[in-house]
Image (cartoon, helix red, strand yellow):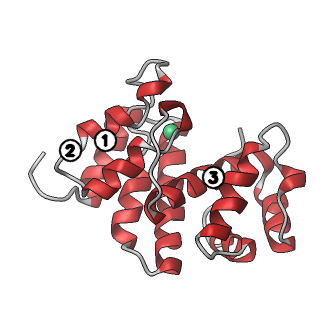
Amino acid sequence: MSAGRLSLAEAEQLVAERLGATPRAAHSRFVGLLLQHLAVELGADAGLWRLVGLVHDLDYFAVDGDWSRHGVLAADWLQGRLPPEALAAIAAHDHRTGIESTTPLAQCLRLADGLAVLDEATGRDATLAALGAGAIEHIVASRPFLVAIIAGTAARQGLDLATLGAILAALPRQAQP
Ligand SMILES: [Fe+2]
């Protein structure tokens, strides 16, 4: 790879190389789009946030089940190609590493990741209905932790659930598992 900030084309190529034609690659692209729209909403760097979403799970198969390294290895691979704040967000996106980052980008990566999981597991219609009504507790099923990740983080970032719904409604539907 060339030096300087990762381009969108390079990020797409890395996803194709590392994740192949898997649901994890589709999830990564979806999280990239969600983060891009969250950045627009928050007045952040939409191009950078999209890249971070796109590459956040690059090491998903490479860590071979050692989730304490998940995101940390990806951030390592991307040293020098993304700003430190972006690398920290990737390294901290999975709670199993024990790494934390409190920047808006890191928080919103976890939010987007959680919202993508909820949308995929629950289905778009039920997810939009819940977001529009302002409560998701009743649709998280076996994933109660998603309430804090999605609703808690949104509140801290000054985003209401209806805004998340409007963003989600504009994105292509994910394949159901
Ligand atoms: Fe992940």
Amino acid type, mark 2: Gln
User: In the rendered image, which residue does mark 2 sit on?
Assistant: 79
Where residue 174 appears, as percent x and y from the top left, is 64, 52
Secondary structure beneath label 1: helix
Which residue is denoted by mark 1 in the rendering?
A: 75
- The N terminus, quarter of image: top left
Position in image of residue 162 (x %, y %): 74, 76
- Residue 99 higher or lower than 53, as above or below: above
Secondary structure at badge 2 equals loop
Of the numbered discs 3 and 1, the one sitting upstream in the chain is 1
Q: Residue at x 53, y 61 (%)?
A: 108
Type of residue at label 1?
Ala
- Residue matched to label 3: 116
For badge 3, the amino acid type reads Ala
Closer to us: mark 2 or mark 3?
2
| Corner quadrant of residue 69 | top left
Provide residue 163's location: percent of width, then percent of height: 68, 77
